[in-house]
Amino acid sequence: MKLTPNGWAATPLQSPENHEIPLPASGTHRSCLKKPIWLVSRPMAQNTGVGIGDFSLPFEYAELLITFASDQGVPASTLLSGTGLTIPDLLSQPRYIRSDSYSTLAGNLCAATGDPLLPWKYGRLLSLQPHGMFGLTLRSATRLSKAYEYLPEFFSTRSGGSQVLQTRRDTETFDILIKSGNRNTPDRVVQFHTIASLVNMAWISRTLTGTSKTELSDTIFLVWPAPSEDGWAAYLPPGTRTVFNHKESYFSLPLAMMRLRVRSGGKQINSAAVSKLRQELSLPPETMDIVGRVGWAIHKTGFKDSTIETASELLGVSPATLKRRLGEKGATFLAVKNAQRFGVVRDLLRSTTLSLDEIAYRAGYENSSNLSKAFRRNFGISPGVYRKSLSKY
């Protein structure tokens, strides 16, 4: 969208090569985002963030989602229902949108269209966006393996913590796992964003390496069943397979592909892009309250090394001031840290088959015994019993 004297107007979204979004091979999908969006009221002064929720995302993603919804014929009243947002909010040129409002936008879009292929279409659209300094960091890496070194560090911060990315490798493949970082997100919205993000990753891998038209053997694994409507393959790169009803959702690449050169890579520009991106992400979003900022600081430092002193240093206040400001919200540093830890533990117990030792390590516990004691003290059951209870549903 661009700001005109009469308000917002949609502009055709373009690929890095300045071409409009191509039609898939099947010819079943029309070009997106060409008609004017419904945001036509008077613009307001710039502010920092709008909406509700514990996480803050760059507003450009909400802008893309809103424009996409307009192209799908979803009216403003339907899209904004229950989001806590108004049209003037969106015209105020905010820097961020809060996570619950963004999730409700996505949920309203899914409900209004009833299109089972919607996340696949949106993922393809996401892959054509520049993604700011994060995108430049990926495009300037020398090899795909180098580009993907940055994913865990930058992806969840770029998404405001609303999504968490993990990577793993074995002797044959490199896997990219994307999970919801917000336990309040409805399952339908988690499905929408997870599929869209994995489709986006599949295309980004091809775009970076110049293999968009090459048959390669990469795979998207999904915990959900296949869409009720055929045609999702038209939104995937050539040769990309899809496996449904899997135990985890992730994108898997052959290790040989990770050695491919990035066609626009350059060491000097990559070094500058990484430095600039780290500078951009060195402060928490301005929309976060003090509890959210402490959570951000804990995420930056890691559970094992996070203390009220390290959080104070990152946030530029004294430990005493931080303790007082948390107390004003009825919180303590330890309570915030434990809430985040237990959130990670429960997510891993629910969505992976990782051992308790590995989960304990990721949550910053010395060993699985310490994790089990803390979990039982907080929830009244052991992690193993909790995991077994989930298998019933």
Image (spheres, helix red, strand yellow):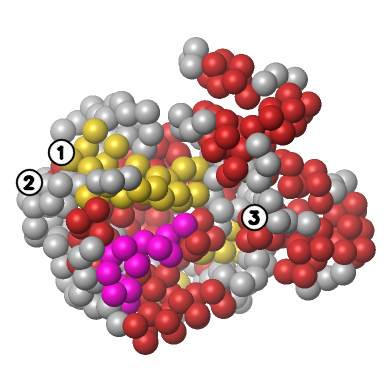
Between the residue at mark 1 and the residue at mark 2, the CA separation in whole angstroms equals 8 Å
Residue 307 relative to residue 1: left or right: right
In the image, residue 12 sits, relative to residue 123, either above or below, namely below
Badge 1 amino acid:
Gly
Q: Position of residue 202 (x, y in %)?
A: 26, 53
Q: Position of residue 370 (x, y in %)?
A: 72, 33
Residue beneath the point at 12% across and 56% down: 23
Q: Earlier in the sequence, mark 1 or mark 3?
A: 1
Q: Look at the numbered disc 2 and give the secondary structure of its residue.
A: loop
Q: Earlier in the sequence, mark 1 or mark 2?
A: 2
Q: Earlier in the sequence, mark 3 or mark 2?
A: 2
Image quadrant of residue 210? bottom left
Could one spot residue 393 in this view of the protein?
yes
Residue 172 relative to residue 378: left or right: left
User: Magenta segment: does it hold 9?
Assistant: no
Badge 2 amino acid:
Ser
Which stretch appears magenta? Answer: 139-152
Between the residue at mark 3 and the residue at mark 2, the CA separation in whole angstroms equals 46 Å
User: Magenta segment: does it hold 149?
Assistant: yes
Q: Position of residue 386 (x, y in %)?
A: 61, 20
Image quadrant of residue 127? bottom left
- The residue wearing badge 2 is 26
In the image, residue 313 sits, relative to residue 289, either above or below, namely below
Q: Look at the numbered disc 1 and give the secondary structure of its residue.
A: loop
- The residue wearing badge 3 is 302
Contact check, label 3 and label 2, Cβ < 8 Å: no
State the residue lying farthest toward the top: 392
Give the label on residue 231, or none.
1
Contact check, label 1 and label 2, Cβ < 8 Å: yes
- Other residues around mark 1 within 10 Å, as few (<14) / some (14–19) / many (≥20): some
- Other residues around mark 2 within 10 Å, as few (<14) / some (14–19) / many (≥20): few
Image quadrant of residue 71? bottom left
